Every structure is written in C-alpha cells, then in structure tokens.
Image (tube, rainbow, N blue to C red):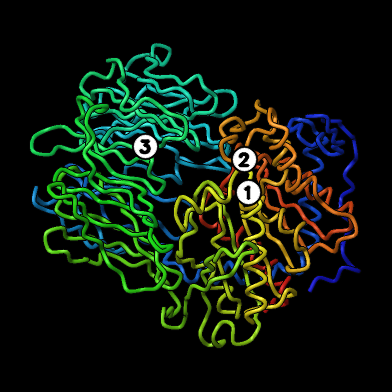
Amino acid sequence: MTDTAASPLAPQTERKPIARTHHGDTFEDPYEWLRAKDDPAVIAHLEAENAFTQARTAHLSGLREQIFTEIKGRTLETDLSVPTRQGQWWYYGRTVEGSQYGIQCRAPIASPDDWTPPELAPDAEVPGEQILLDANVEADGHDFFSLGSFDVSEDGTRLLYGVDVAGDERYTVRVRDLATGENLPDEIPGTFAGAGFSPDGRFVVYTTVDEAWRPDTVWLHELGTPVADDVKLFTEPDERYWVGAGFTRSRRYLMIEVGSSITSEEWLVDADDLRSEPRVVWPRREGVEYSASHAVVDGHDVLFVLHNDGALDFELVRVDASDPQGERSVVLPHEPGRRLLDLDTFRDWGVAAYRREGLARVALLDYADGTLREVGFDEPLYSVGTAGNPEWAPPLVRLGYGSFVTPGTIFDYDVATGELLLRKRQPVLGGYDPADYAQERVWATAQDGTRVPVSVVWKRSFGDAGAAPRALHLYGYGSYEHSIEPGFSVARLSELDRGVVFAVAHVRGGGEMGRQWYEDGKLLAKRHTFTDFVDCARHLVEAGYTTPDRMVAEGGSAGGLLMGAVANLAPELFAGILADVPFVDALTTILDPSLPLTVIEWDEWGDPLHDPDVYAYMKSYTPYENVREGVRYPRILAVTSLNDTRVLYVEPAKWVARLREVGADAMLKCEMVAGHGGVSGRYNAWKERAFELAWLLDVVGLPA
C-alpha cells in the first residue's frame, strides 16, 4: 500500500469562484477557470498534476513494467488478421513486433469462386501482396495518430484514408493511387470519421461538424476538382440531430442517416445520380427510431425497416423502395424481451442481430418466409456479431465471437450447410488455457426489487468466486443503451492471474435487458444507474465474493459519471475508484449548448437549461457538485486527455480539485496529446493500462 506519510504534496488548485445561476439557483464554481485550455496557467496546473501522480505512484514502476511485460509477452506481436474478400482482392492487416500501428495489405483472389480465405503465416511471404497503408510511416513524427476513414474504390485502384494527429477527431482525408503509391492532389481537411468512395470511384462522400462538434453536413467531392467546389448534399439545422452517410451493401443507394437519442430519419440518394434530390424514407416523428436496409426480393427493390413505432423492442417490416411510406409488410413482429438491433441485408438473405436474455444473438433471415435460423453457441456468456462482410452475394457470413475466457474468434458461417468454420482464434502466448478460468452470471436485487445481471470471471486455481472474499474489480457503464459485452482481454489476465475477480454490473441505462432497461436508466430515472451499481457491489460483498476494502470500481466516459456518483452515494463500499475520461461535471456541461454534443445529449439526460425539474434532478447527482464534506472517500484515479472533444479534460480536473478540498486521496493523469480514446499506438495503450492496473492492484493490496 502507498506510504502516505512519505507522499509528495498535491498541487494546490487556486480558487477563483464564478457564479452560475439557473432557475433561481446559484452555484459558486471555484475551479471553472481550468476550462481555459490555452491559458499557460491551466497547462502548468495539468503538468503539475501529472508530476504529482507520477511521484505518488513511483513505487509502482516495477509492477507497471511487469504488467506491461506480461501483456506484451502474451501477445503475438507479429501477426495477421483473417483476410476479407472484396472484389478481386483479399484485404487484411499486419502487425509487426516493435511497431505501434498496423499495416493494411491485400493480395489477389485465386478465382471468382474463391471464398476460403488464405491461411497466412507471419513469417511466410504472401503471393502478390500489396501494402496499402503503413500507419507507422504515416504516424512518423506525431505523438498521436488515428485513422477515421479507410476505403478502397470498388475497382481497387484508389485508397481513401482520414488521419487525426491531435486526438480531437478532426480528420484530414487523402486519396492514394494504388498503382503508383502517390497521393492525389485531393486533400479534405476537417472531416468527421467515415468518408468513403462512391461505387463508381469518381466521388468521395464525407461529413463535417458544426461548432458544437455535431456532424451536420454531408458533402460530395469529385476527385480532381477543388475542395471549395464540393457539393453540399444534405445539412441538418436542428442541433438535436447528428448526420451520417454511407452506401448500402448493394451499392444501389447512398443512405443519409439523421438521428438523435430518441428519433431518427433516413434519406435515399440514387448512387448513379448522387447530385439528385434525396428522398425521405419515413418523415421523422418525435420518439420514433428506425433504420432501413436495401435488398432485392423477387426482382423488386425493397427496404427492410427496423422501427419502434408502437414496438418497444422494435419490429421489422418490408416496404417498396420506390414508395417507402406505402404499405408495410411485417417480417419480424414485435416480441417483448427480444430487442431487435440490426438487419444486415445481402442479396439472398439477411442477418438479424438481437438481444435476448441479456446476450447478443445472430440469425439468418429467410426473405421468402421471414423465418430466423439462430446461430448457436455453447458458452453461458459470450458476445457475437457480424464482422467484415462487404460483398453483396457471398456464400458465407463472417462472424466475430468471444467471451471472458474465449479469445476473440473469427468464424465464417456457411449459409447453405449451417456449419461454423473456424478461421482464427486470437493467439494468447504463455500457455493460456481457457479451462483455467470460469465465468458465470449472477443476479443482484436492486432497491426497487429489479433483478440486475452481474457477469463474473475468475481464475479457477484460486477457488470458486464467492467461496471466500477476494479482491474484486467491478466495471460499469449504463448509458445510451450501450451493452457491456462479455469479451476477452489479454490485459485482464494480469489481474485474474493474481487472484482478482473481475465483474461487470449490467445496470439500467444500458441495453443488456432490452429497450425498457435503457428507458429505466435515463432522464428522470437516471439515478437507477447509480443505485443499481451500488446494489450490485453490495450483493457481491454479501454473497462473499469480496469485501469493501478489496473492491475497486471502474467506468469510463458516461461510466465515469457513474463512478463519480457512486463515490458520493456509497464511498464506504469501495477501496478505490478508477474513472477514465469521466463525465463528472455533467450539469455544467449539459447547461451549455455551445459545448460539443450538449444539445444532442438533452434526449439522454434532459434539458436543465430550460426545465427546472431536470436541473434540480441533475444537480442531485452530478458528481462534482455533490462531493461531500466529512466523508472518507476511496482512493481515486481520474484519467483524461487534453484534446478530448467528448468529455473535456476540465471535468476530471475540477472534480479532483474539489475532492482534495474534502481530504480525498485523488489523483489526475492527463495525456497531453490524446483524445477520448486515450493514447494511440498499441505499446502506448499497453503501458497506459499497465499504469491503471498497477494502481488498482496496489489499492487492493496485491502488488506482487
């Protein structure tokens, strides 16, 4: 444990109170001045926080290095992904030992009937291989590097890629001639992620953001023409809605998607006439969400539309693509408890994704009779979904699969035979055996009687989880209907192998148990998210899994809000709290419509700017404003990034300063060149996780 008597002094954060008044309530904010990112005093303060955190954790340097070495030692550093067929090529990625970033490659297919991906070996030459993009070369000279767009033209002659070197998720799109390896003069700065080629390769379709970082406009760029001449295809003036665009798998339409948290609208543009007027699928109606997928059934262009109009867990209907607002034919009726999530349409069949009993499922949809053929798996907990299926008429469907104990696995599902063809399982070096680990789902009872699922994984050699109290790492999120799936983690093995039990509390606000689960954890029901997490933690203590002095909670982004809230609600339940890019100054942010994403977020959290009831409710839970005097808080580590545009660094910076005011042992670690996802590069990411895990192990008294 940390020798606090020998600890360095924490930075003293100057108080400069700024009054904020809404609905007759005034809040004196002493640390709002930290928002001035360009102020040298702010940068100096963040650097002082980093220096303090490094000094306070210096005794863990050996453990950090050990964990980093373990992660590195379990990873096959030189490896290849399973090739995906697109057109006349197999596309795949390489990683090379010592390199931070991946290398994107391709090799020619053997024949038009070649659907079995070649088995590639890291040390073997691939006949006809072409390197499309070496991200290590592109990242040279930059502290941060991220790809936000990557697309190859349908004829295979050109590459499009979008690069961010700051972490602010503004990407510069470039186009490369794959025959010469030279970039074309076309360069589009300031784009959002997801740019792509038109089917004929003449155009680039991309989106841009407004001043609040909301994707609001779709553009059409003709290769070889000035960016200043780009055509505005669509713009959305309503600040509550974001915009996206992409071509259907059939390449028949450009689909422009407009959405908020509760309402959506889609527009079709004929791919062979991209300058034509977009036509709406269904006009937006407040509270109605839908998504459309194009298919050809019996020679007719149709749209399969997944929607929640009178169907809480969604329904699938079919409409004529030429008259989408006409007659609806129900394909998959609403079935309570089966949350329909998506439909991937191919030429001859579709692939439906849905959740049932808290787990993700996939099934083949027969266009002729609307029946589903579910793909079955044996494990009690798992995650599955489609993965990399660009072709319109393949005989196979690529699936990604994994669990807490089964490393990431790629299957091809043979539609004709129903056979699952194992293509690759993520190699884990060092003698990893899934049988050495166990996973289970237990149920906690919330304050209102609701049963909340908790997923648990542990190493068997330490005994059954719950047989005797052990160190426990409890993770949570609980917002935006996002589900935390039971996926594999190499880094997590460094905890499990030291006897730590890892658990996920699937609290309300997430999507694990269907749409109502989400509705019961948002807006004026948001506190359910926090109390559910507390109740899950209490259950794990009462059931003998752990004790409060050996439990650490973790959450990131909106899950960081969860961390701040439970620190105030039940500080006695946790020894430590790890908050990644935490949304802990939620009320300040959601009150300011000029900040990134705020107006869009009102559907999730409510509008405290105009609604006094929402203001009062948010003020009752927002972590920064509810830090309490006279409370013994758990040890807290907040991790953030200076260039994060989703949750600004100022939120955890203010929170940590306020926590210290009441005597909490709180630290801030701010990456000075990174964004919402943290540092870039796999070795940097491993070192970052090793830092966090070493701190966590120290908190629970397991530094070995």
Query: Disc 1 vs disc 3: Cβ atoms closer than 8 Å?
Result: no
Horizontal and vertical percent for residue 308?
38, 41
- For the residue marked with disc 3, what is the amino acid? Tyr
Describe the element under mark 2 as helix, strand or loop: helix
Query: Disc 2 vs disc 1: Cβ atoms closer than 8 Å?
Result: yes
Describe the element under mark 3 as helix, strand or loop: strand
- In three-dimensional space, the C-alpha distance between marks 2 and 1, rounded to whole angstroms, equals 8 Å
- In three-dimensional space, the C-alpha distance between marks 2 and 3, rounded to whole angstroms, equals 21 Å
- In three-dimensional space, the C-alpha distance between marks 1 and 3, rounded to whole angstroms, equals 24 Å
Query: Disc 2 vs disc 3: Cβ atoms closer than 8 Å?
Result: no
Residue placed under numbered mark 3 in the picture:
290
Residue placed under numbered mark 1 in the picture:
526
Horizontal and vertical percent for residue 425?
33, 67
Say which residue appears at 50% left-offset and 49% top-offset.
481
Badge 3 crowding class, 10 Å Cα cut-off, few under 14, some 14 to 19, many 20 or more, is many
- Residue 495 or residue 374, whichever sits in front: 374
Badge 2 crowding class, 10 Å Cα cut-off, few under 14, some 14 to 19, many 20 or more, is many
Which callout, 2 or 1, points at the residue further toward the start of the chain?
Answer: 1
- Residue 416 or residue 122, whichever sits in front: 416
Residue placed under numbered mark 2 in the picture:
605
Horizontal and vertical percent for residue 66?
62, 72
- Residue 366 or residue 96, whichever sits in front: 366
Residue 444 is labelled as none
Q: Residue furthest top?
A: 229
Describe the element under mark 1 as helix, strand or loop: loop
Which callout, 2 or 3, points at the residue further toward the start of the chain?
Answer: 3
- For the residue marked with disc 2, what is the amino acid? Trp
Horizontal and vertical percent for residue 564?
72, 53
Q: Is residue 339 left or right of residue 494?
A: left
